[in-house]
């Protein structure tokens, strides 16, 4: 398992330092590996957010953008990141359901409660890894949920990932991604396309008809294997 990417969003310097110290202690005591980033306002993490973290530990009451609004914005592009609110006011807890927060911690946070919550958060984040893929996009990493990927296209030395929310370009190879995604219901229709079988609406002649109406060519040498893979997927023998 790779390092977990954790964001701490807290505008109080003392409270932020405490959480960072807790994370370092938890790593040491539990043999975990974290990549930690800190933000002093919800606006700074929410603006231009691209599924960059596995766990977000977030204060609610902050000056420019509160944690609840930041979480709402994050959820528009990242449905799987684990969000834990850290707040001094327990009345905010019920609002956490709106943004699918895993839980909340009440300030001042004792280490025991923090460590218990981290164990739950890590378990959830590791579970999410099986339903998503981490990709390098130049200077940053992003995580895409597998169910949101329609198909992956290779154009020269660039990979275009077509998702429900748009396109993502990365530098990789279709062969590498095929190996990563073979056990998750992705199959080649030709030398240029790696198709998410979950989004295949049907086969029409030499075309694979996608759930969004697009038609992708199936090469003649691959048609039998593609049809078999699709049938197996529909019948539940492929995951």
Image (cartoon, grey):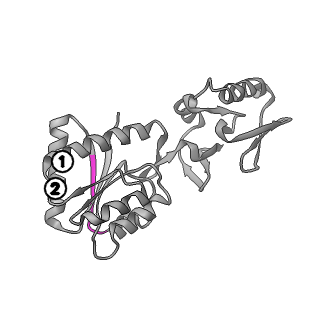
Q: Position of residue 10 (x, y in %)?
A: 24, 64
**Marks 2 and 1, how far apart at CA:** 7 Å
Q: Secondary structure at mark 1?
A: helix
Asked if disc 2 and disc 1 are in contact, CB closer than 8 Å, the reply is yes
Seen in the image, is 151 located left or right of residue 39?
Answer: right
| Residue 111 image position (x, y, % from top left) | 14, 48
Q: Within 10 Å of the Cα at label 1, are there few (<14), some (14-19), or many (20+) other Cα atoms?
A: few
Secondary-structure class at tag 2: loop
Is the magenta region chiefly helix, strand or loop? strand
In the image, residue 172 lies in the stretch drawn in magenta: no
| Residue at horizontal 43 percent and vertical 39 percent from the top | 129
Q: Position of residue 29 (x, y in %)?
A: 15, 37
Please name the residue that numbered disc 2 is placed on: 109
Which of the labelled discs sits on residue 207, or is there none?
none
For mark 1, what is the residue? Answer: 113
Split into 4 quadrants, where in the image is the C terminus? top right
The quarter of the picture where residue 190 lies is top right
Q: Bounds of the magenta span?
A: 35-41
């Amino acid at each position: 398992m790779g390092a977990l990417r954790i964001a701490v969003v807290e505008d109080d310097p003392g409270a932020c330092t405490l959480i960072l110290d807790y994370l370092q202690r938890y790593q040491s005591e539990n043999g975990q590996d974290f990549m930690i980033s800190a933000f002093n306002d919800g606006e700074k993490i929410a603006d231009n957010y691209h599924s960059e973290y596995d766990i977000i530990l977030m204060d609610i009451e902050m000056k420019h953008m509160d944690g609840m609004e930041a979480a709402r914005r994050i959820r528009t592009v990242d449905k799987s990141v684990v969000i834990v609110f850290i707040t001094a006011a327990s009345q905010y807890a019920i609002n956490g359901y709106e943004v699918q927060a895993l839980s909340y911690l009440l300030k001042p946070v004792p280490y025991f409660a923090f460590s218990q919550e981290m164990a739950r958060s890590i378990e959830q984040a590791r579970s999410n890894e099986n339903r998503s893929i981490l990709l390098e996009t130049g200077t940053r990493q992003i995580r895409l949920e597998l169910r949101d990927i329609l198909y992956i296209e290779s154009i020269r030395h660039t990979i275009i990932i077509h998702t429900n929310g748009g396109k993502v370009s990365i530098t990789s190879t279709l062969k590498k991604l095929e190996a990563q995604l073979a056990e998750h219901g992705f199959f080649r229709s030709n030398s240029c396309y790696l198709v998410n079988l979950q989004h295949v609406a049907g086969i029409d002649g030499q075309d694979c008809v996608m759930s969004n109406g697009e038609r992708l060519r199936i090469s003649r040498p691959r048609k039998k294997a593609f049809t078999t893979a699709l049938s197996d997927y529909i019948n539940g023998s492929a995951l």
